[in-house]
Amino acid sequence: MSSDRMTIDPKKLLFLATIIEHGSLNSAAKALEVTQPALSTSMKRLEEEIGVQVLERGPAGIVPTAAGEVLYCHARLIRDEIGLVKRALMNARDGTPVVIRIGSLPSLASSLMAVALEKWRHIHPDRELQIVEVPQIDLLTGLLRREFDFVIGFTECYDLESGLRQRVLFRDKLYVVARADHPLASVRQPDWATLIQYPWVCPTARRSHVILDAVLRKEGLSTPEQMTVCGSVGLLKALLMNGDHLAVLPVHAVRAELEDGRLCRLDVTDTALDRNIAVFFREGFQLDEPSRELVTIIGAVGQEMASSDALAPPRPVETAA
């Protein structure tokens, strides 16, 4: 069937997504509040409309074919867009956002954001809040797609400034972090050529650390041969503590591990290991009073943590007797 004659019913795509996520027609039918025969008929008609099979029965239940996987990716986007439309309509009708939805860098979420949100909750105990931690590029694209009201990230914007505004809240200092008994833990001022000989892990889901990349470009060095990227700061810490991995992180993200001796700061200083943390929001978007108060609190907590982190010394470097 040619693409210009193909007709796809969006509702059937949403049904398909639910089936794939539940792994069975029966469970999906209950979730969708339709009968199983009606759901089965809907999928048969979808396959007839596009001319390919989208589901098959596997050992673990109903699974998508290759074509089903393609449709599932688009079905999720459609579902997300419908959710955004519903939220926008509710906000327009009521005049006040039903939910404050914000995005944060993973390296800020478990430390700075946790403290700031606790302070904010004492002022607004009843306001619903959703926070998502994702890499910088996803924060900004999500903001442009109206998935977030505002996001907290760093000021390098991947050329996505169009349509966005930003306001710097504080300056964050980054350090090279490793397990306490790492081979470089007692080395005085190791250079970057030495550092990149070790495996690295970065707190992102898609690419290496932007600031680390900038430092290495300045030094004329390539990225480490062994680079692991992950969206979980918890997994990142585990990799650091259980191997020779290195990472660039703010002290506040690993303060507990530094204080109890599981991790240490290496004796590495570089002016490039700084970043401005800013609040980003869409051009023309007006933060309501609770949102403005949250941004103010995040900025204050960030400034306080950045000041205390600057005073935290690296691991003492042993000297020869």
Image (tube, rainbow, N blue to C red):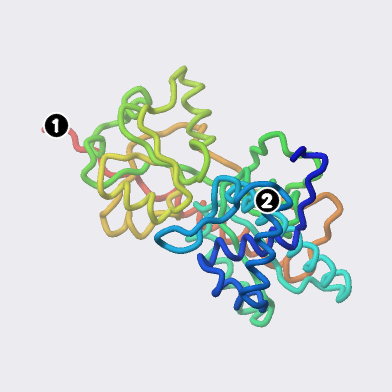
Q: Residue 320: which numbered mark, if any?
A: 1
Is residue 215 depicted above or below 74 in this figure? Answer: above
Q: How many marks?
A: 2
Q: Position of residue 304 (x, y in %)?
A: 54, 58
Residue at image position (37%, 27%) is 225
In the visual, does 109 lie left or right of 161? left
Is residue 244 shown above or below 68? above
Of labels 1 and 2, the one closer to you: 2
Helix, strand or loop for disc 1: loop
Is disc 2 surrounded by few (<14), some (14 to 19) or many (20+) residues within 10 Å?
some
Residue 276 in the image: x percent, y percent?
A: 61, 43
Residue 81 in the figure: left or right of residue 183: right
Question: Which amino acid, by three-letter code, is at mark 1?
Answer: Ala
Q: What is the C-alpha distance between the residues marked 1 and 2?
A: 62 Å
| Residue furthest to the left | 321
Amino acid under label 2?
Answer: His
Looking at the picture, tell me which residue is in the foreground, 13 or 169: 13
Residue at image position (39%, 34%) is: 227
Q: Position of residue 291 (x, y in %)?
A: 73, 66
Q: Position of residue 109 (x, y in %)?
A: 52, 59
The residue where tag 2 is placed is 74
Few, some or many C-alpha atoms within 10 Å of disc 1 (few <14, some 14-19, many ≥20)? few
Left/right placement of residue 240 relative to residue 46 reads left
Which image quadrant is residue 159 in?
top right
